[in-house]
Amino acid sequence: MITEHVTMAAEPTRPEPQPLFCWYPVDAPTPGTAKQKIGRTLVLGGDAALQSHVRDHLAAAGVEATVVDLPDDRTGDALVAAATALLDEIGPVDGIVDLGVATEFALSDPGPWRTALRQTVAVLKAVYDDWAAETDANRLFYLAVTRMGGRMGYDGEGVAQPLGGIWAGLAKSLPQELPNCRVKVLDLAAEADAAPYVLRELQTWDLFEIGWRDEERSTLAAGRHVAGPARLDLSPADTVVLSGGGRGLGFAMARELASRFGCRVLVSGRHPLPSGEEWAELTDEEFERRERDRLRATPPDSTVREIRADTFRRRARREALHNLQEAARRSLPIEYHAGDITEPAFARALVDAAGPALRVVIHNAGVAAPTRLRNKTVDSFLATIQTKVDGFVALLAALGDRRVDHFCNVGSVSGRLGGMIGQIDYAAANEALTRLGFWAGQCGQQVTTICWPTWQRIGLIANFDAALRYADALPVDAGIRLWTDQIEAAEPGEVMVLGRIGRAVSPGQLKGFANFRDHPDTDRLQSLGHYLGEVEDFAPFRSIRARTRLAAGSHPCLTEFTVAGTFALPVSLVLEYALALGDWVTPEGFPTLWLSRLRDVIVSVPGLVGDADGFELVKTGSGRKTGDTWEVAVSLTDAAGRPVMRATAEYESTQNKAMMDPLAAQDDWGAESPTNGEGPAGIAWSGVLYRPPLWRRGPDGRLSARIDEVPSSDEWTLPVPPARVLLHAAIEAILRARTANGRSPGAVEEIRIAEIGIGSGAAAGSSVSVVGAADLGAWRVVDVAGQCVLTLNGLEVV
């Protein structure tokens, strides 16, 4: 949905390169003392002593907590059945405290992470249907405990158990599939007692990632990064090992390195190259037709799934063969080695084949099975993790005491910020990869992890168009240049590449962007959070209810307008909060829709008045499709349930360009200034923020005025002032004129507007012209170019 405070155009062209970001720990505010209700909780992971300790600590605080200890010898399906049986016994659960894997990590013994992760996946699958159907935004939670030093591993002071990254990536991806599940990653030092911190953090859901060390609370922030100067000079005498480089993105990089530097590149793949198979030499069209025929003629001893899997393997082997043939034609020194990079013997053989000239290792191998967690098996979940994690461990172990000039991990934005629907295991694998890189650094092997977004039409994304709803795709040529720059700079740590963020942001994900700085969408994301407030109920693509609290006198816009001498919310501000609900109630698929008008507006003037503490708005929006229009019915009440405003917002597939003719000439109009103080209705504006205009009356009785719009930074005392759809100064001027002219005496109960039309560029420009009909019931706002950007029709004050 398109409004100016979200600015989500479909796919605008952006020639500028996608920026680089680095994350770093910053102080986090201490959580408040208010205690939130904690429902029935499961405690899993860690070891038996830790589980019992955390359970007892929660129980002492009145939390009904149950330890989960599923049999280790069960298969994936049996584990899910055991978890389901536990829920049948104790009833629905409201939250999970997942202690993950608490032992220290060693290259020779990574720890019991598979056992712990199987239990996590089994329990999440068992609660999935209940949690996916929940619309209460304050019932469910998932809190993962990691042991990376209390700064999430980002302070360079050592990581005891980097595989906590698995649970961190998993947690941050849950809100996409379970929109009302609150999530948090709690990172602690290895020796810290987890129990009191768990209880403390269950009281507040302010941020996604929190670390505690020496009673100091921290979180992560992101800032722009520029690659340093080239320190690594590759040449034809050098060798690069690139896992998973036989096709796709990996081969594109192998080809770039071999052609640009002339270095020898050893790429790997799980499958051997075709040798003599007739299907491998078919044209693309012939191959696809043959595979379709195989699928239609599935023999009795095979299944469709088996044929599809075999076709996938054939396609991968064929692509690798053609890539190597292309490299040979160009005389590029690229060699293919078939084997499983997660197997230590194969990783050693690959490193041995590179010989003493090995200078760079790139761990690019990965698999993806994009489907909802409900449909993933426990074994397939682990397989995705193992390719990244075990592959890294095998390569690092194969190097032994040998130090290469650069070790580069191919990570993903999905791990850092949470993956899209179906990517929960992929996100977990990539977040673990980053933390493994930190761990390797403290052991002397400097590692860089690059967190990539979706690449254009290449890589592991199964549905490219769907991926664009989450973030811009990275052009392959631009990405390869960025990648090469990072390899030449050879800077250890983590760097993230991320362009504009798409429309598929869930309310729960906004906390993940709380400290995301210097990004082109920072203002938009901050605005979304400001207008959203605290979500209380959310049904994706259907409805939302949220609450906003504004402290008395905290912002200039709250001290501008009064009703009967008491501070009240300006009508334009209430309209803005109502329109913002439409950002979250969208049709399925997140189509590009443009806000066209707000109709049937009724504002209760007494409802605008706050109390001594300030203002509280309970905002409800529900959507439906009517013909070619998407409608969102919005309703605002105060904390006591008294009406404040209701209306219907309409969204169209095309944007309003010009709604009326340009402003007529006014040279012969006279001048007058209507009453600016409090009238019989008890409505008044101070005029400090929204200054009273000088009105001019035309021969036909119309009113006109030039109005200087007030920037959002003058309305709000916030570090990032929220953007807006409406022209607040113009609307307040119209209401001032309407209440000061032609109304009946007595208190005003309601302001009614039949329709507010919204055109393109409604918030653009510093000066606009406002014209009102002689009866003051119809108005239009025109920008300096003569473009009508806002209309009000059927304005009544009763």
Image (cartoon, rainbow, N blue to C red):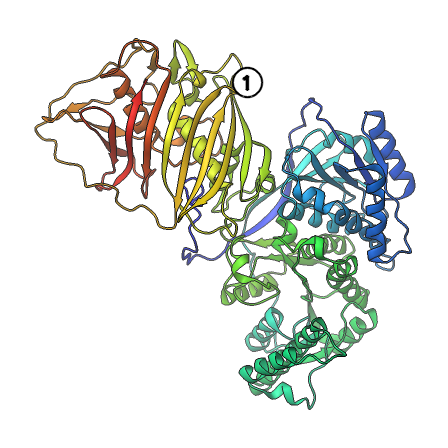
Residue 312, by quadrant, is bottom right
- Front-lying residue, 439 or 16: 16
Residue 376 horizontal/vertical position (percent): 72, 57
Q: Quadrant of the C terminus?
A: top left
Residue visible at 32% across and 30% down? 754
Q: Quadrant of residue 95?
A: top right
Q: Position of residue 698 (x, y in %)?
A: 12, 26
Name the side, left or right, on which 567 lies relative to 48: left
**Depth check, front residue: 277 or 113:** 277
Is 680 displayed left or right of 493 in the figure?
A: left
- Which amino acid does the dot numbered 1 rest on? Ala
Residue 170 makes an appearance in the image: yes
Can see residue 515? Answer: no
Q: Position of residue 621 (x, y in %)?
A: 50, 35
In the picture of the structure, the residue carrying the numbered disc 1 is 640
Question: Could you tell me residue 188's position as x and y percent?
Answer: 77, 39
Horizontal side of residue 785 vs 404, given as left or right: left
Left/right placement of residue 8 relative to residue 450 reads left
Q: Secondary structure at mark 1?
A: loop
**Quadrant including the N terminus:** top left
